[in-house]
Amino acid sequence: MDKRTAILDAAERRARQGGYHGFSFRDVASDVGIKSASVHYHFPTKEDLGEALAERYIKSILAALGEADQLEPVAAFDRMADLFLKSHEVDDLMCLCGVFGAEAAILPDAVRIPVDRFFRELIAWLASSFGDVKEAELAVATLEGGLIISRAGKQGDFLRNLVKNWRSRYV
């Protein structure tokens, strides 16, 4: 793995645990086993690193989702829900853009703008299957909110039960 990718991986893990302001270049350098100057070489500012994190996260989530327009609504919802469940149950991490979104008022625009785009992209992706933007907005809000509630209260099954209840609306 190249250093840039290792830096992004370490920074993403830290950001998904503590938010944009919850880590430093020194923390990331320590995780990767390099000097903080090496982090600055690849990402001159934290804003540059945050923007790169958000852009990479968007790209990876959309790639994992694939095409939605040929999916039935329940299959599209399940595909998205699986990503949120994996984040919670396997990775034990928050959604990167969910954490950053909670900090939107204090994020630099270079980071806030792609975070906003992330949510618009998720809604558009689901809406292409649902045929209804409002329903897609509700589904995305349900998944992101369910992830937050599950993690905040250490309620392991909350998100899984929420997904099950949501899915029963279509089956």
Image (cartoon, rainbow, N blue to C red):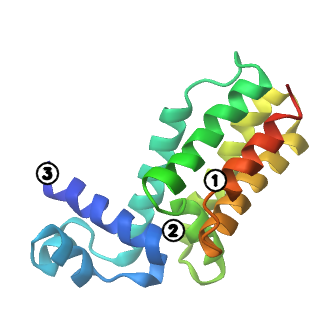
Q: Is residue 44 left or right of residue 73?
A: left
Whether residue 72 is visible, yes or no, is yes
Residue type at tag 2? Ala
In the figure, is residue 30 to the left or right of 54?
A: left
User: Which is nearer the eye, 27 or 146?
Assistant: 146
The dot on residue 110 is 2
Residue occupying image coordinates x 43% and y 83%: 22
- Across and down, in percent, residue 5 comes to 23, 54
User: Quarter of the image holding residue 4?
Assistant: bottom left
On the question of residue 140 being in view, the answer is no
* Residue 17, quarter of picture: bottom left
Q: How many callouts does the rendering have?
A: 3
Q: CA distance from mark 3 to mark 1?
A: 28 Å
Q: Is residue 141 above or below residue 130?
A: below
The disc labelled 3 sits on which kind of residue? Asp
Label 1: state its secondary structure: helix
Residue at 63% over, 74% down: 152
The relative height of residue 123 versus residue 8 in the rendered view (above or below) is above
